[in-house]
């Protein structure tokens, strides 16, 4: 597992070093430019000063047939001053500077000891870059009003040293300050990570059942998203735990009665000696088992549908032909009701595409049809119609059963609620399952009176968007 702090620290160090290197490069380049301008100005100034000093005394200089006058320069090491560049006597860089004075015909009249006797550059006014004795020199040539040629020159090494010194002066403080910078960054990162450490410590100290939200105001702004995500997880866990507790309580409540009846029937069946009476009791045991099986199956269906919250997406999402699904479920249930003389009619469009979870929609249709079959008396009528309605899909189921009072149509969606006096067996979970499925599919269900006096059900689902 990588440390975010070490990764961030390494990234900052790399960035600082990179920026420092770029700064040193531009400092070096700008240093060379500035040094060149400064030294060019100094050369021109030195040549003009030398011309002004020499012109009044030109007749005192040696004639053409004599040796030129020689100006000595100071050498730093000559008197044992070591590596000192500057002293009261001068600067060791004097050996890197040179000048010459020539007459109008180009004869050498005066020169510095540090320069050669040969011309420093061609006798033409202006700056020139030349190579003397294997070293680069920068030369400025001046023609005075008296006709003298004055040349001032310096080695290129001086400019390189100055530019390098400027770059070094920029980079070295950053390099020497890098350990301090790393230490300061580490301290800042440690301080900034305290908010996250408090969240971790608070979660570690919590009891397993403590799912209270974390206060987002108690952490830095940058951790607000993390806190919101953790609080969302706590909320989903709390919902899941409540759902499991409710499922356990409902199962214990709903299965207690059939289990007790089943135990009594089984005991009576064992104790009964009359074969006919024993068969009747065995039939009761079978009916109790069938009811328990149905209750358990519906409770499991309900738990599966409730485990996916509305808007959380559909795991089995895909294109489904709702009309084919309805016909298939109606055919399966129609076989069970064949002996009761029920009149089953399936109408509507041949193909009705919807997008959803086929298993969940199948459970919904099966529960709606099962209710219609269960509450419709023998010889009654059931009509199922499915088709498009505007941009959506409409599924209508009508039966000729006893119907449902208007004031009870909302209560029947409650878990385990059954209207008294219906005369039909059931667990009261069917419509709860239907509502859960529709919540996942952004659908709605409406209960009404059918044209035969029974119950009518309208289910609306979003249609398939073209393209």
Image (tube, rainbow, N blue to C red):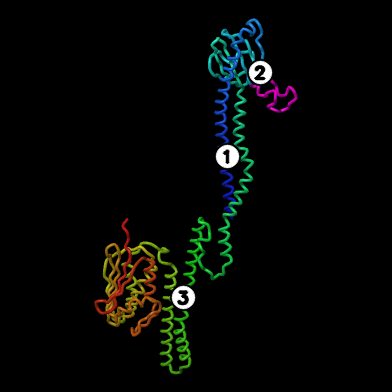
Q: Position of residue 38 (x, y in %)?
A: 56, 26
> In the rendered image, which residue does mark 2 sit on?
114
Measure the alpha-carbon separation of dots 3 and 1. 64 Å
Residue that protrudes farthest toward the top in the picture: 65
Instruction: State yes or no: residue 270 in magenta.
Output: no
Task: Indicate which disc, 3 or 2, sits on the residue closer to the N terminus.
Answer: 2
Q: Secondary structure at mark 3?
A: helix
Task: Indicate which disc, 3 or 1, sits on the residue closer to the N terminus.
Answer: 1
> In the rendered image, which residue does mark 3 sit on?
246
Q: Secondary structure at mark 2?
A: loop
Image side of residue 410 versus residue 196, left or right: left
Quadrant where the C terminus sits is bottom left
Task: Indicate which disc, 2 or 1, sits on the residue closer to the N terminus.
Answer: 1
The magenta region covers 73-96
> In the rendered image, which residue does mark 1 sit on?
20
Q: Quadrant of residue 117?
A: top right
Measure the alpha-carbon separation of dots 3 and 2. 103 Å
Residue that protrudes farthest toward the front in the picture: 56
Q: Position of residue 3 (x, y in %)?
A: 59, 53
Quadrant where the N terminus sits is bottom right
């Amino acid at each position: 597992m990588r440390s975010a702090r070490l990764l961030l620290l390494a990234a900052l160090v790399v960035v600082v070093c990179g920026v420092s290197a770029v700064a040193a490069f531009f400092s070096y380049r700008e240093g060379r430019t500035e040094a060149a301008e400064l030294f060019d100005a100094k050369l021109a100034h030195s040549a003009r000063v030398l011309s002004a000093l020499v012109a009044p005394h030109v007749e005192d200089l040696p004639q053409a047939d004599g040796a030129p006058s020689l100006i000595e320069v100071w050498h730093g090491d000559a008197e044992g001053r070591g590596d000192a560049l500057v002293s009261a006597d001068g600067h060791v860089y004097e050996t890197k500077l040179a000048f010459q004075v020539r007459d109008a015909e180009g004869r050498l009249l005066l020169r510095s000891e540090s320069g050669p006797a040969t011309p420093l550059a061609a006798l033409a006014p202006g700056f020139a870059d030349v190579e003397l004795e294997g070293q680069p020199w920068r030369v400025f040539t001046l023609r005075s009003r008296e006709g003298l040629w004055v040349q001032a020159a310096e080695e290129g090494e001086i400019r390189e040293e100055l530019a390098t010194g400027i770059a070094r002066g920029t980079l070295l403080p950053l390099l020497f300050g890098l350990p301090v910078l790393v230490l300061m960054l580490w301290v800042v990162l440690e301080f900034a990570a305290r908010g996250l450490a408090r969240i971790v410590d608070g979660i570690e100290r919590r009891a397993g059942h403590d799912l209270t939200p974390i206060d987002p105001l108690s952490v830095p702004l940058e951790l607000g998203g993390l806190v919101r995500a953790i609080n969302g997880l706590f909320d989903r866990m709390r919902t899941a735990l409540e759902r499991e507790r409710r499922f356990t309580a409902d199962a214990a409540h709903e299965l207690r009665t059939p289990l007790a009846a089943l135990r009594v029937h089984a005991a009576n069946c064992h104790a009964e000696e009359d074969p006919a009476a024993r068969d009747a009791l065995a039939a009761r045991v079978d009916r109790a088992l069938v009811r328990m099986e149905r209750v358990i199956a519906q409770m499991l269906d309900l738990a599966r549908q409730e485990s996916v919250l509305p808007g959380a997406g559909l795991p089995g999402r895909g294109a489904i032909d709702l009309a084919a699904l309805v016909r298939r479920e109606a055919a399966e249930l129609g076989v069970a009701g064949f002996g009761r003389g029920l009149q089953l009619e399936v109408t509507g469009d041949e193909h009705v595409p919807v997008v959803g979870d086929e298993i969940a929609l199948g459970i919904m249709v099966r529960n709606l049809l099962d209710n219609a079959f269960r509450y419709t008396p023998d010889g009654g009528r059931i009509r199922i119609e499915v088709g498009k309605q505007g941009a959506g899909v409409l599924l209508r189921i009508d039966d000729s059963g006893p119907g449902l009072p208007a004031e009870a149509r909302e209560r029947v969606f409650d878990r385990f609620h059954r209207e008294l006096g219906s005369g039909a067996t059931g667990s009261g979970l069917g419509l709860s399952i239907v509502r859960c499925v529709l919540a996942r599919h952004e659908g709605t269900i409406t209960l009404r009176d059918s044209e035969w006096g029974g119950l009518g059900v309208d289910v609306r689902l979003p249609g398939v968007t073209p393209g």
